[in-house]
Image (cartoon, helix red, strand yellow):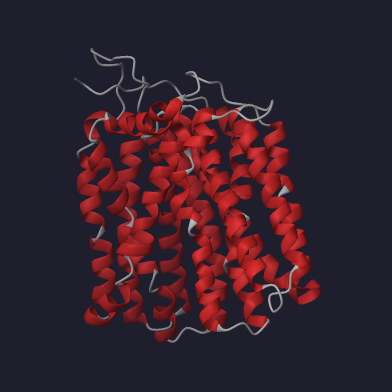
Amino acid sequence: MTPPVTVRRRFDWRVLSTRRMLVALLMGFSSGLPLLLTSTLLQAWLTRQGINLGVIGLFSLVGLPYTLEFVWAPLFDRFKPGMLGRRRGWLLITQLALTASIAAMALLNPHRDLLAVAFLCLLIAFCSASQDTVINAYRRESLDDDEQGFGASLYVNGYRVAMLVVSGGGLILVHFIGFRAVYLVMASLMSVGFLTTMCAREPALIAPLPRGLRQTVVEPLLSYFRRPDAVWVLVFFLLYKVGDLTASNMTIPFYLRMGYSNLTIGLVVKAFGFWAIVAGGLLGGALMLRIGTYRALFWFGLLQACATASFALLTVTGPSVRALAFVISAENLTLGMSTAAFVGFMALMTDRRFTATQFALLTSLMGVPRVILSAPSGYLALALGWLPFFVVCGLMAAPGLLILRRFRHWLEIHPSPPSGVGETPALLE
């Protein structure tokens, strides 16, 4: 039977300035704020306190909740806490818990309370991963299918702004007020999240809340695997961004070995590159509204592969600031575009009845290329040399793009629904 699709309608560009899009942006900020509080900022604090490097390394384990969120995600689909509704109720709970746990960090001294610091960091990561799951579900349910790409780009950009606030602004503030006070400042910034939650509208339920183990846990999995090419879509999620993730794992050692100074890396790669990613996310989200999901995934992915391979040019030019700025512009612009398309596609592949559970499964799967598949990147660079390494990383995009072509018949725009469409919720465009 032909897979169900959504009718293509004329897009009203005024939707880009609606409250729903502002909510997507602000929720992205709330989602990104806690992440570096248990990694970058924490590592700086522990280092300044003279904590053993081995112990600092072990603190990376507090990030495990980000890869295990699918375990408790069904609770967010099953229960509706309080009067705010299913999504806003859980959001308020997680955001208030985050505010309290981040503020509590200011009461501790890593030398004296190291175990308590570890426990609080684990709690922050748990609440943060839970908030991410509910925010993803909220965005999927509150935006129409053709708005998902632009909504995802705003969410991702809000996320990145929050990370810049913590990693850049936080470390600058530490110089003046110290680490404890900075954690209090970051806790106060969580007010952006719960004020947004209070002002947002609760998405309408399209089906009764799931009940029992089968409806809560088993049915979301069955619902996903009933979709066209379900297994191939999972393989696509694994492979689409593996090339740029493998390359990015080695970029800092590459810059240093090419002779770039720390100042140049900070100004060009981090500061200038940040705004290129933001611009790419906005551009990618807007273009998706015009060209559709399939063409956005294909062309943005292809451009990302070419930009990844362009790092090989730096092995020829040497430590040229202009060449570095050109490569970083291309890499980060296309990274923002491809990420917007990828996250938008992920949203569309979830069933609105089980959004939190399915989104958590897919985001957990997204972590596999970053953590596992890109792990041998250093050995690959040593074996090949820098120029062939980046060319190979660019070519790694090919399998994902080839698999994407398999989805073209149901992912591209259709002028009208095909015959035989059942009652399954519309999938894509």
Q: Which residue lies furthest to the front in this view?
A: 212
Residue 201 placement (x, y as % from top left): 64, 27
The answer to which quarter of the image holds residue 47 is bottom right
Residue sitting at x 46%, y 74%: 322
Q: Which of 172 and 202 is in front in this view?
A: 202
Locate residue 97 relative to residue 10 in the image: left or right.
right
Vertical position of residue 266 compared to residue 328: above or below: below
Image quadrant holding the C terminus, namely: top left
Q: Which residue is drawn at 33% across and 68% down?
A: 310
Coordinates of residue 217 in the picture (x, y in percent): 40, 34
Q: In this view, does 190 lie to the left or right of 52?
A: right
Whole-percent x, y for residue 24 in the image: 58, 39
Give the quadrant of residue 232: top left
* Screen quadrant of the N terminus: top left
Image-based side of 363 in relation to 274, left or right? left
Residue 7, quarter of the rendered image: top left
Q: Is residue 176 above or below residue 11?
A: below
> Do we see residue 18 in this rendering?
no
Left-right relation of 292 to 228: right
Q: Name above or below for residue 225 compared with residue 204.
A: below
Q: Is residue 107 above or below residue 231?
A: below
How far across and how far down the image is residue 140, in percent?
49, 33
Callout count: 0
Seen at 43% across and 83% down, the residue is: 319
**For this rendering, which residue is in front, 156 or 369?**
369
Residue 12 seen in this snapshot: yes
